[in-house]
Amino acid sequence: MKKIVLGVSGMSCSACSNGLEKYLSKQDGISLASVNLVMANASIEYDEEKLTVKDLERFIKEAGFKSTGLFDITKSNEKVTYTDTIIFGVLVLVMMYFSMGHMIGLPNFKIFDHHMSPIGYAAAQLVLVIPFLVYGFDILKGGIKALFHLVPDMNTLITLGVISGFTYSSVKFILFVCGVIPSYGSLYFESCTMVIFFVKLGRKIDKSGKESTKSALKSLVTITPDFAVLKVNGEEKKVTIDEVKPGDTVVCKAGEKFAVDGKIISGSAHVDESFITGESKPQMRKEGENVLAGSINYDGYIEYEAKNIGKNSTVSEIVRLVSEASNTKMPIAATADKICGIFVPTVMGIALLGFIIYLICGAGFSESLNVFITVLVTACPCALGLATPLAVVVGEGLCAERGILCKDGKTLEIADKIDTLFFDKTGTLTTGKPVIVEVENASGMTDDELVKICASVEKFSSHPIANAFKLSKKDDYFLPAENFKNYSGFGISADINGKTYYLGKGAFIAEYAGIKDLPEKSKNAVYTEICVAENSKYLGRIYVADALKPDAKELIARLNKLGVEPVMLTGDNEAAAKEILKDIDIKRYYSGILPKEKSDYILKEKAAGKITAMCGDGINDSPALAVADVGIAVKNGTDVAVDCAEVTLMTDDLMKITEFIKISKNTLKCIRMNLFWAFIYNVLMIPIALGALKWAGITLNPMFASLAMVLSSLTVIANTLLLKRKSLK
């Protein structure tokens, strides 16, 4: 099976997208189809041996829509202009002047006067309605096609209403002109113009809202430059990105953006990667480190080797993953989709039933038709259809802006319910890199001098503890050392200025430096002890430990505030686990466990009905990440996403975890509000359209019904865009 994402134009409501999805799904050779109204695309898995891309595009056309080729978010932006809206808005005013001007005492030409020239009065409206039928031809055509394929949508409702009103009015007018009837009574030409005008206006507002929700993703795509500067035979050459090949040497000067992903060959600079990692401060990047396309070189000259280019870049990969995530449907959307699936046929039935009941009760044909048209026009599946996908796109975009990669909409919904969050200690809550926590000095020299000697010896060691001494040290910091020896698992030694220095466990110092009686330790067993000796002289101890990340304490405080219980999992012993927890408010922890056992603890919580999340680095905790309801991987390498995790943090900033949970909660709250307003609108307006408040003198005609429909969509769009302004603290 092959997967392809095709752009689709012509969809206006959830009934459209659901109808297309059903039509595609029932075609032989298609195993899965998912249509996204907001992104305007169709994700299709199909059998290449049975179908071609042209076949898929033909299916889309048969369903009443148009394929725009392979989906590309950078080209999906249909510029919204309001020129036609202004022109037809003026025509609407002209129509209102001719049809209703006399009601408020406005002067009119005799030839168009309602009483003096009824034929001229009606003919003027008939002439004016023709341009609107042409203007709304896409709606009428789509509505008829959808009805023909037995998947009626919003276009079908509008089409039935407009055609009914236009046909009835035209027939009455012709019969009057021919002298068959003495009067044509009420006409619906002005209602047809108003309905088409407001529906088209609503479509433009919807389109603007959809494009606004995709702004975060589009800003990611457009942030990469179109040109690069290559260094060829010592000379600089400006080329387009398409001309860059992996292995080329690319130049980036201060103030410029990196053109492609690559690895620094020479130079160093502070680099702004906030657009992808969410890290607000520029990070130092030097020789041997990776840089990302679109990041900004603040203050240095860098030459780097091109690695990932164009659609293979990290940015493009993120956009692809987020676009796919936006195409997945939330469980909460399932109910809305089911309702939308029966909504249009139900409204058609209600409108027809209302028409029949009014006729039976003695109302005239004109009044009954008015009820029929008003019910069709006032119903708004569009607002229902936008409620969920619009919010998902905004939520996914907010995550992407903050360096949080969420793989699907389902995860965004589950995160709202997380009540237990498991942490792998090493590399997640802690830095994973040993640091010097205390120097016990008996040498007579300063602490810095003692550490410098140790660092000069440890420089040659590959043991993880050696990093505590070598961290952020430049080459000119170290003293010249020779005759380095490594006593595996025991200690190391080297000669500096003719003296031999020993670093290791107490037993190592006793055996090789001949120092039998060492002073008592000042620290407990949770710290790693490094004894130091010069020839046979004891110099002191240096204690090394894995330190908490600076933001770990605040993270735990925020989680507790959100009602999420933090739980720590570690392979360390009980004493080491307790030592780490002295500074953070984690009540529950499990120590001395193997990596493969972590998943067992998570499964127990799930069995107890808890909604769990697991946060780790994706290296030795993959099973735990996989079994949790939400796996959160802290990026540790060059891969954009960790396969076993639903969420990947593009930086090791732990605050991203609570930001993700807050985005999830805000998104779900927004969806619920959207669905509430969309449902309440239809629940209230359809009965009013049927005349439920007629006893109070409140009635609804097609003109105001179409305006109300636009306002309902506008409410959903406005509420969704407010999601961008919500606090994440």
Image: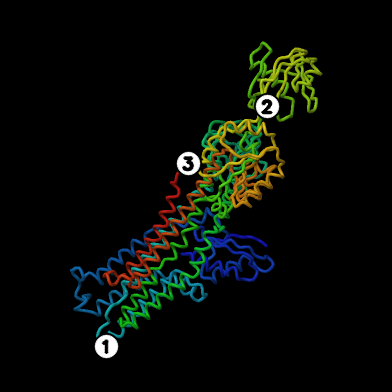
User: Quick check: can you spot residue 654?
Assistant: yes
Element on which disc 3 rests = loop
- The answer for how far apart the CA atoms under marks 2 and 1 are is 106 Å
Element on which disc 1 rests = loop
Q: Amino acid at mark 3?
A: Lys
- The answer for how far apart the CA atoms under marks 2 and 3 are is 35 Å
Give the quarter of the figure containing the N terminus: bottom right
**x and y, in percent, of residue 84 in the image:** 37, 62
Which residue is labeled 2 in the image? 527
Nearest the eye: 642 or 472 = 642
Labels 2 & 1 near each other (Cβ < 8 A): no
**x and y, in percent, of residue 589 in the image:** 63, 39
**x and y, in percent, of residue 304 in the image:** 63, 37
Categorize mark 2 by other alpha carbons within 10 Å: few (<14), some (14-19), many (20+). some
Which residue is labeled 1 in the image? 179
Question: Of the residues tagged 2 and 1, which is closer to the observer?
Answer: 2
Question: Of the residues tagged 2 and 3, which is closer to the observer?
Answer: 2
Residue at the image point whose x is 25% and y is 86% from the top: 182
303 lies above or below 217: above
Residue 499: mark in rendering:
none
- The answer for how far apart the CA atoms under marks 3 and 1 are is 74 Å
In the picture provided, is 178 more to the left or to the right than 253?
left
Tell which circle, 2 or 3, labels the residue nearer the N-terminal end. Answer: 2
Residue 729: mark in rendering:
3
